[in-house]
Image (cartoon, rainbow, N blue to C red):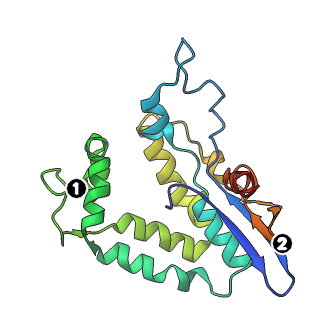
Amino acid sequence: GIGGGGFWLIHDAKTSNNVFTDAVEKAPAACHADFYLNEDGNVKPDIAVNGALAAGIPGQAAAFVHLAEKYGQLPLKKTLAAAIQQANEGFPVYHHFQKLVGYRLDNLKRYPTSANIFLDSKQNIPEVGHLIKQPDLAWTLQQIADNGFDGFYKGESARRLVAGVQAANGIWTLDDLANYNVVERQPIEMEYKGHKVISAPPPSSGGIAIAAMLN
């Protein structure tokens, strides 16, 4: 999701080149190795999982821009258009959505902004067919479509993000957002029964796990 990050494994058929694009979330500069530990050295699970202190600097938006500019054939104005339309107009709640919201219902209720978007007026799981509209998401996606990297990591979007995080006792700064960068890495290659398998290097655990299982 746009609040997180991800990995992309890309194969260029013309050149037979493979590249791994790392756009995972990064820790804000004020974070440190013991940030989520209590005085006894044990993890404080709530702040490590829920709320503003649990949030890394998102990489997904930067990946949209990086992939579109370096590898894509279509501009973001076109590829993001359907998502912007759906965020504005809404989508009807379906059974799987209800199931997923149920897993996080108590936590959604803790955060009024999230509850107002994803729950009904009584803060319950919405009925099937209830329309989920996300105009703020649409606005954010439009900023990326119009202004690329700066549309998310600088300017008004960045100011809104940092203000929201800091209001919830988070530690993001404008510099944390502006300094985000996508990293390209060499994929892992392995042999399996005469086939070459190409997969994800660290910080993903996927490629190493696959190599171990196949061997």
Q: CA distance from mark 2 to mark 1?
A: 52 Å
> Residue at (82%, 62%) from the top-left corner?
190
* Mark 2 vs 1: CB contact within 8 A: no
Query: From this viewpoint, which residue is outermost toward the left?
Result: 122
Tag 2 secondary structure: loop
Q: Nearer the viewer, residue 193 or 106?
A: 193
Please tell me which residue is depicted at 32% across the width and 56% down the height of the picture: 100
Total labels: the figure holds 2
Residue nearest the viewer, comparing 154 with 50 = 50
Task: Locate residue 70 relative to residue 76 in the image: left or right.
Answer: right
Of the pair 156 and 193, the residue shown nearer to us: 193
Characterize the local packing of mark 1: few (<14), some (14-19) or many (20 or more) Cα atoms within 10 angstroms: many
Mark 2 crowd level (few <14, some 14–19, many ≥20, 10 Å Cα): few
Residue 163 point in image, percent of width and height: 46, 45
Position of residue 79 relative to residue 186, above or below, is: below
In the rendered image, is residue 149 in sight?
A: no
Instruction: Give the residue number, with chain letter if any, for mark 1.
Output: 119
Question: On the rendered structure, is 84 left or right of 70?
Answer: left
Identify the residue position indicated by label 2 in the image.
194
**Residue depicted at 22% across the width and 56% down the height:** 119
Residue 189, given in percent of the width and then of the height, sits at 82, 63
- Examine the image and state in which quarter residue 214 appears: bottom right
